[in-house]
Image (spheres, grey):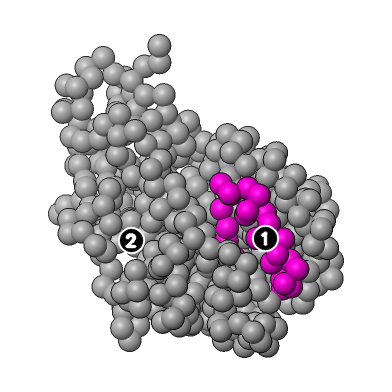
Amino acid sequence: MSEHEILRASILHTPDNPFTVDNALQSFEDGGLLIRDGRIVACGDYEAILSRCPDAVTVDWRGGFILPGMIDTHLHFPQLRIMGALGRTLLDWLDRVALPEEVRMSDQAYAVDIARGFVHALAAHGTTTALVFGAHFSSATRALFEVAHTAGLRVVSGLVLSDRMLHPQLHQAPRAAYEDSAALIRDFHRKGRLLYAVTPRFALSASEAMLEVCRSLVRDHPSVRFTTHLNENVDEIAEVARLFPWALDYLAVYERYELGGSGAVMAHSVWTTDAELARLADRGTSVAHCPCSNAALGSGIFPLRRHLDAGVHVSLGTDVGGGTGFGMPKEALQAYFTQRTAKEGVSLGAAHLLYLATRAGAEALALGDDIGDFAAGKAADLVLIRPPDASELAQVLQRAENLEQSLAAIFTLAGSESVREVRVEGQTVYRSGRP
């Protein structure tokens, strides 16, 4: 029989949505997280948890902070090595920076090397679950799945589907795209902690025949997820309107092929109309807000208030490599900055940032019953944050008057140097800088 284990540290999580519920942040200064067989048994004050299970083994992490594992709902596996290409707009950046690198994924050895670095970077930043654009090549996407499975992370990904308007090496014939995708679904969907997502790059690069392939894949495999881009850049939107003259708007292109709904995530949504927002909310389609890449590529300021008012569910994505790194705390902080300066911005507190970086992502991926917070019965996906003793964050935490102030400091100052241990379903996948 497996032993109960208590992780002892300050604990913070958001079992409720702070955008709709007051006092959604739950915190314990001297907290205890009771785990057995990789699942949460209870979360609360340490002494109360210990009295409930006095024979449990205690792991003493006092001085640190236990948060739910971070959940990144939009980033690109082939773009690990192209971060930092500043001064370009979306379509120029794609043509000159991103797509040439994605062509290199046809080299299997190179793809495996990128996959290893990519998965390591996720874990090193405390990300336990990620919705990832795979590669345009089946062999490279397979490498990502295999590396993620070995590492023990939760990765939701898929072959990126395009048949026009990219570099020709990245185009696929629709029949081959279906067959390659179906094979990857068969081999990796629900294998361990992996899930498959049908992933057209965006409507601009997917013909009607390729979008029909996406519809067939979703119909034939109803438990897979779906992800793509939506309304990121005004030039992109204009080109989509030219390519699909029959469509009322950008979202209508995907809707014709029944692409969306629960477990579907549209990345960016910077220029989405009120009519589109209403339809996203009606179908339960989520949006991945990517504030760092929106700023870096000059795409625009995300209208968070309009999304919330329309009832559209919003999570966070780092958008590596248009974004500026794998750190979800940094991404949440950029969301805070953006909303502080937006004309109709939303005032975000520490609880909102934690929710956006954790539970919101679980809900976007239709995994809210299993991950995202420390409710009893959920998987023990968590990150231990403890900054180096001489760091600025450590100095600030010494003066914090309560845990909410500490959490705000963590989102402001914490980087990978403060990630001490990461667990997925109770299994350690990263510790003290070692994979």
Q: Does 226 appear in magenta?
A: yes
Range drawn in magenta: 205-229
Pick whichever, 302 or 298, lies toward us.
302
- Give the image quarter of residue 412: bottom left
**Residue at horizontal 26%, vertical 14%?**
55
Please give the name of the residue rendered at 38% of the width and 56% of the height, measured from the top-left corner: 360
Q: For mark 1, give the secondary structure.
A: helix
- Toward the viewer: 324 or 258? 258
Is-magenta flag for residue 10?
A: no
| Amino acid type indicated by mark 1 | Cys
Q: Looking at the rendering, which quadrant does residue 53 occupy?
A: top left
Q: Which mark is residue 214?
A: 1
**Amino acid on which disc 2 is placed:** Leu
Q: What residue does disc 2 label? A: 353
48, 114: nearer the viewer:
48
The answer to whether residue 311 of the structure is visible from this angle is yes
**183 relative to 92, above or below:** above
For this view, does 263 lie left or right of residue 188? left
From the viewer's perspective, tell me whether residue 168 is left or right of residue 192.
right
Residue 296 shows in the view: no
Point 82% across, 56% down: residue = 176
Q: Secondary structure at mark 2?
A: helix
Spatial CA span between label 2 and label 1: 33 Å
